[in-house]
Amino acid sequence: MDCGFLRLPAHPDLETYFLEQDKLLVVLPEDHALADCERFLVKALADYPFMLLEKGAKAEIWEIFERCQVMQKIHFATWDDYAIMSMVESGLGISILPRLILRRVPYRIITKELDVPAFRNIGLALGSKKNSSLAVKRFLEYMEYRQDLISVN
């Protein structure tokens, strides 16, 4: 594998480059009682059944719960973000998902920003820039041109 896109921080043996900060949003069914709120209160997360997106590592959502001291009871956990959106659409609960996942979805759901903003950092990881393929080197050059690519380690 030449490189991978992942959530930062990553394993210290990898060379990683910060690419983008992806905001985490609350996902609600369209008819939810708080559908009209401007920002969703983090403390209100404990008042509703919660659908957790969990993809192997400790989910970013746990960091929100811990930081804001929210005692959340998880009603369902899955690695499938589309299953989460479908369950939210059906009124089975609420969730928190990254904005990038929520682009152009066919579900009848709404998103709200949290009153305490939360993000995930997305980066590019590779074994070694020096030993990477020409394609990866060109991609890194393009990213440097496109934005201030920041080496994380």
Image (tube, grey):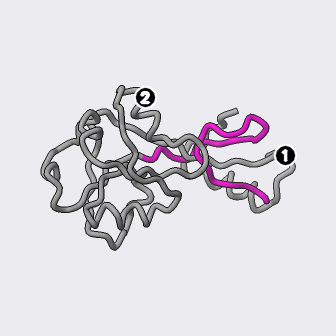
| On-image quarter of the N terminus | bottom right
Image point (67%, 40%), residue name: 10
Distance Cα–Cα, label 1 vs label 2: 39 Å
User: Residue 99 falls in which quadrant of the image?
Assistant: bottom left
Badge 2 local density, few (<14 within 10 Å), some, or many (20+)? few
Q: How many marks?
A: 2
Residue 119: x and y in percent read: 43, 40
Question: In the rendered structure, does residue 8 fall within the stretch colored magenta?
Answer: yes
Left or right, residue 37 beside residue 29: left
Image point (65%, 42%), residue name: 17
Residue 153: x and y in percent read: 70, 32
Q: Visible in this render: residue 16?
A: yes
Left or right, residue 65 beside residue 3: left
Q: Earlier in the sequence, mark 1 or mark 2?
A: 2
From the image, state whether disc 1 or disc 2 is nearer to you: 2
Badge 1 local density, few (<14 within 10 Å), some, or many (20+)? few
> Disc 1 marks which amino acid?
Lys
User: Residue 110 falls in which quadrant of the image?
Assistant: bottom left
As helix, strand or loop, the secondary structure at mark 2 comes to: helix
Q: Is residue 133 above or below residue 23?
A: below
Q: Which residue is mark 1?
A: 130
> Disc 2 marks which amino acid?
Glu
Image point (75%, 54%), residue name: 137
Q: Are marks 1 and 2 in contact (CB under 8 Å)?
A: no
Q: Which residues are magenta?
A: 1-22
Q: Nearer the viewer, residue 54 or 92?
A: 92
Residue extending farthest bottom: 106
Image point (35%, 32%), residue name: 71
Q: Which residue is mark 2?
A: 66
Left or right, residue 136 beside residue 24: right
Q: Nearer the viewer, residue 72 or 124?
A: 72
Residue 28: x and y in percent read: 26, 55
